[in-house]
Amino acid sequence: MLRREFLKRFINWSFGILGLGMLASSIHLYPKEVKEMQTRYFPAINSDDAPRKGVKKTTLTYTDNSGENEARIFLAVLPEGLTAFSAVCSHLGCLVDWDRGKELFLCPCHGGKYDIAGNVAGGPPPESLTRLPVEIREGKVFVGVTV
């Protein structure tokens, strides 16, 4: 075997072993919590208190691995039914508010605007508001959160 051939094989094997080591370490270092995340439903409000039209702001209390948390959400009545949105702006994470007069979700930080369906209506937000799954059962509105 020539020296050149030996060096080619040595380099190829070295990169192969290095690649396998990187793959193994990335699998090991990947957070366990992220791997096991799932959508769980938590009660938001009584179904009698759900909006019949328009938008209602509420706070969702839920429990995950870090303990008890609260999230501001909006319940909106759309043609397809009751829909829940996270109140977190997709631009930089500020909390939006519903303006009844303008019929828009408005972000106070950088002027982001969203329509009643959560779609971007103006400003810098790159994406729509995050929709959250909704179920109505046992006389309550349950909202899904990935935990």
Image: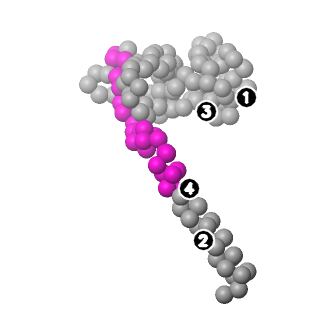
In which image quadrant can residue 129 be found?
top right
Amino acid carrying label 2: it is: Trp
Residue 30 appears at what percent x and percent y?
Answer: 49, 45
Residue ID at (41%, 33%): 147
| Relative to 9, residue 118 above or below | above
The tag earlier along the polypeptide, 3 or 2, is 2
The circle on residue 73 is: none
Residue 101 appears at what percent x and percent y?
Answer: 63, 12
Amino acid carrying label 4: it is: Met
Question: Which callout, 3 or 2, points to the residue nearer the camera?
Answer: 2
Q: Which residues are magenta?
A: 23-48
The tag earlier along the polypeptide, 4 or 3, is 4
Q: Which residue is mark 1?
A: 124
- Inspect the magenta stretch and tell me whether residue 78 lies in it: no
In which image quadrant can residue 22 be found?
bottom right
The circle on residue 13 is: 2
**Badge 4, how many Cα within 10 Å: few under 14, some, many 20+?**
few
Question: Which callout, 4 or 1, points to the residue nearer the camera?
Answer: 4
Residue 121 appears at what percent x and percent y?
Answer: 68, 28
* Nearer to us in this view, 78 or 145: 145
| Relative to 49, residue 146 above or below | below
Distance from disc 4 to disc 1, alpha carbons, whole Å, reads 38 Å
